[in-house]
Image (tube, rainbow, N blue to C red):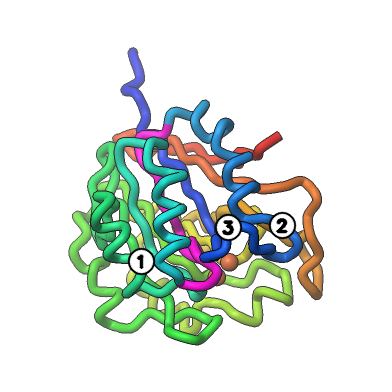
Amino acid sequence: MVMPRPFTLLQLSDSHLSADPAAAYRGQNADATLSSLLPACRLLAPDGVVLSGDVAEDGSTAAYERAGQMLNDLAPRTAWIPGNHDDRAAMAPVFDRLGYQAGPLLEWGGWQIVLLDSAVPNRPEGRLDEARLAPLDELAPGRPTLVFVHHQPLAVDSPWIDKYPLTKPERLWSRLDARTVKVVAFGHVHQAFSGERQGIACLSAPSTVANGQPGAARFTLDPTGPKARWFRLWPDGRWLSGIVSAG
Ligand SMILES: [Fe+2]
Ligand SMILES: [Fe+2]
């Protein structure tokens, strides 16, 4: 039997671009590290890209414009959610003009893609209220689903970032059914994390600029460089995921 071709989804996270393209983020240059990662991303030939927040460090229009220039020809479809460092009011007009999708519910490759906004202005931790969770009430039961949210909905065992999680995560978990939702994907933690809750995979995308060594009490730069997460999604609900790095 011939397997149907999977949908390749690339998750890029925590790029932390600034208005000043020469700015440093944790000792790295965000433009240079993102650029260094793109050739390996192109080899994956993604059908869709999800930017899972902290696209900008400073919420500036200039940073979103430059992100758009760098990513615009990467895939036929691009979607986004904001992170705690983003400014949705600055981000939306730039990404709307580029045709990037804000969801909150997309259909990609036979999967339902849910884009949840957990960012709270001027707060490092995340929050989902009833209005933000409402897209989960619209899901077709039993159709494979991937949920994106910026903040981690479970501890990743790194104290420096577990201080700033998705608060009241039970609001999310009480709405998720493993018969429909296969994966919850997040950013924010600046490392590759893989876990499970309620039979649902919990996967983070590492940062395209600076990652921390897992388990560290304080942020300690991982010297292995910028990374991103990929998914291959089959319409029957099977999936694979892995990490792409610049090297
Ligand atoms: Fe971040
Ligand atoms: Fe963040």
SS category of the residue bearing label 3: loop
Q: Residues within 10 Å of mark 1 (few under 14, many from 20)?
A: many
- Left or right side of 174 for 14: right
Mark 3 and mark 1 residues within 8 Å of each other at the beta carbon: no
Q: Residue 132 got which mark? A: none
x then y, percent, for residue 169: 47, 78
What type is the residue that disc 1 sits on?
Answer: Met
Q: Nearer the viewer, residue 119 or 239?
A: 119
Closer to the N terminus: mark 2 or mark 1? 2
The total number of labels drawn is 3
x and y, in percent, of residue 44 in the image: 49, 29
Q: Could you give the CA–CA distance between mark 2 and mark 3, rounded to whole angstroms? A: 11 Å
Q: Secondary structure at mark 2?
A: strand
> Which marked residue is nearer to the observer: mark 3 or mark 1?
3
- Residue that numbered label 3 is attached to: 21
Answer whether labels 2 and 3 touch (C-beta < 8 Å): no
**Which of the two marks, 2 or 3, is nearer to us in this view?**
3
Dot placed on the residue nearer the N-terminal end, 3 or 1: 3
Q: Residue drawn at (47%, 63%), measured in percent from left and top?
A: 53
Majority secondary structure in the magenta region: loop
Query: Could you say which is closer to the camera, residue 97 or residue 247?
Result: 97
Q: Quadrant of the N terminus?
A: top left
Q: Can you tell which mark lies on residue 91?
A: 1
Which of the pair 68/5 is nearer the observer?
Answer: 68
**Residue 142 at least partly seen:** no
Q: Secondary structure at mark 1?
A: helix
Q: Which of the 4 image quarters holds residue 236?
A: top left
The region drawn magenta spans 46-59
Picture layout, residue 76 above or below residue 93: above
Residue drawn at x 50%, y 65% as measured from the top left: 56
Indicate whether residue 227 is drawn in magenta.
no
Amino acid type, mark 2: Gln
